[in-house]
Image (cartoon, rainbow, N blue to C red):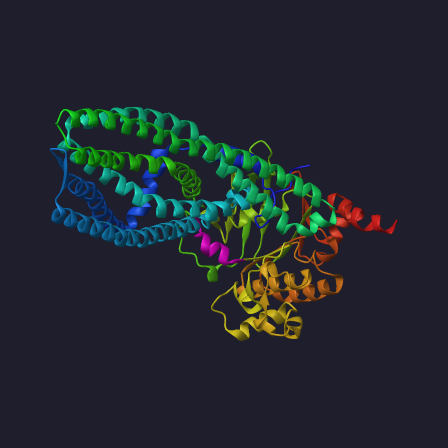
Amino acid sequence: MPPMPPNPNNKQQGPGGRHAALVNAEKPRNAKETLGKLLSYIGRSRYIFFGLMAVMLIMTLLGLAAPYIQQIAIDCITLDKDKLSVNTDKLMKSLIALGGVYLLNSAFSYMQGIFSARLSQRTVSTMRRDLFGDLVRLPIKYFDTHKHGDIMSRMTNDVENISNTISQSIGSLISGVLTVIGSIVIMLIYSPLLTLISLSTVVLTIFVSGKMTKFMRKYFLEQQIILGRLNGHVEEMVTGCRTVASYSKEKAAAQQFNEMSDELRKTGIRAQICGGVMGPLMNCISNFGFVLIAAFGGWFSFKGWITVGTIQAFILYSKQFSRPINEIANQYANIQTAIAGAERIFEVMETKPEPDDGKSEMKAENVRGDIDFEDIRFGYDADKPVLKGFSLEIEQGRKIAIVGATGSGKTTIVNLLTRFYEPDGGRITVDGMDITDIPKDELRRSIGIVLQDTVLFRGTIEENIRYGREDAPEEDVIRAARHANADEFIRRLPDGYKTQLAEGGTNLSQGQRQLLTIARAVLADPKILILDEATSSVDTRTEMHIQSAMVALMKNRTSLIIAHRLSTIRDADTIVVIDGGRVAESGRHEELIAKKGCYYDLYQTQFAGNKT
């Protein structure tokens, strides 16, 4: 039996399997390339960025001035012929200047926090907008082959990690570069020899950090991938909570969650340990450098080459030189998490969007409704074809029912007609024009679809019906609801058409939700109507109401009805039976029963079997 094609609105597994998509898609990228793309987003808020740089420059200059003032203050105290001498006036001026430096530094530190927060929020706001804009233009196949929870994790967790890193690390990076440059210049002025001794540890620092970077990066990317999987599992359990409870699978679901959580914990521990090691290692190397400076500085002072104040200032400048390296090392875990998240975000952004090569001037309101499937071949997997030379010609205004066994390709026909997927061979025409030449917006506006799985959004009932035509006046909304036999139950609700729906419309019954989706299709007034198991989720009485409404709705429209309940399609103009990816037979109900072919077998299975 051919595989069951995925429903584009189904939030469950798509073709190819869930975990296969994650394993194949989430490969590490070039960190430099990712960082370059991230910097381009930061650069879009250039005025805030330049303001932050100006603030950090002032803070750096104040930081560099402090050790110099301290040196002056210390050198105000001298020992002359075993007598302590203090230049009180100069000492007081130095202390006042030092207090002013620290006060100004605090004020500019507050300004740095403001600039950093604005830069991070504007950057991630732009990134989040671009990500969602690219997300809605992705082909349906992408959503069928990726966990929805993982996609949401990229939109939330990964973006938030980038925001935190920008607000915490950008200022440090700018300050670090300026401080390193300024410290080296001043240290060279004080003592070129001591400077060379101090820089002797830099080579060791670069070597150790480079080795640790390559080792740690894989753990941070793995951590983000597992987090996406965990979110996907939670999303599944929440949306499928009734199914989980009905099969008493709560313990199994909890166990699966715990296994993923443990895997995330272990990976997180490895990542955080590796990231946490960087800081102590850098501090150890820096402290070794301070020992060298103190030892050689004391010897130089004993020789009379430099003063004690100079040694103090030099040690402080040496600390300022090593501080940025240590800060970056301490924040390395956050930086790596942000880069890993950015890789996952850019992976979505760089996925090819849904192709739309339609260049014709055809408009939805001008579509008549003639449809022709010509030798269509298609498979969700290349080695598992679903349709194998499917051909069907549908005249304008005709009501066509498509039936067949599960997995025969009924829903696939809808996916191809709406261009959710592209055929591997053959072509589909509407009014004689290849649908690839029709702009997708116009093609889809000419088609109304009512699916078995109802899709309602948070908002009022009126807003959900108007989703089919947002500019529709209120009287048209009410008229559409009446056509769908939904007006009666809507008016019984406390707020009528202004009733707020919960997420997915869960505060309504399944039948009521289906009636609203039918009303939405009625309001859209499409030239082509597709009913994919539209009445399978309602009771018999509601089904009768819907059927009577559909008679009027389908008048003068090309209608495709996909149904398992053969009782709902007996009055169709033509019934098409699909078997083996092709049209096995077609005709009216009585004709097909008389042939005693595939349709007869289906009919006997559904009805004759019920009599035994």
Q: How many labels sit on residues?
A: 0
- Judging depth in this view, the residue of 354 and 436 nearest the camera is 354
Residue extending furthest toward the front: 82
Q: Main secondary structure of the magenta part?
A: helix
Residue under the point 80% across and 47% down: 604
Locate residue 539: give its quadrant.
bottom right
Q: Is residue 597 left or right of residue 72?
A: right
Left or right, residue 499 beside residue 308: right
The x and y percentages for residue 473 are: 50, 73
Q: Is residue 218 above or below residue 423?
A: above
Above or below, 439 against 552 in this view is above
Q: Which quarter of the figure is the N terminus placed in?
A: top right
The structure residue drawn at horizontal position 48% and vertical position 54%, both measured from the top left corner, is 443
**Residue 450 belongs to the span the image colors magenta:** no
Q: Position of residue 410 (x, y in %)?
A: 63, 46
**Which residue is at the front of the view, 317 or 4?**
317
Residue 282 in percent (x, y) is at: 35, 30
**288, 341: nearer the viewer:** 288
Q: From the viewer's side, name the closer residue of 571 and 564.
A: 564
> What residue range appears in magenta?
437-447
Q: Is residue 405 visible?
A: no
Q: Is residue 137 left or right of residue 460?
A: left
Q: Position of residue 224 (x, y in %)?
A: 48, 39
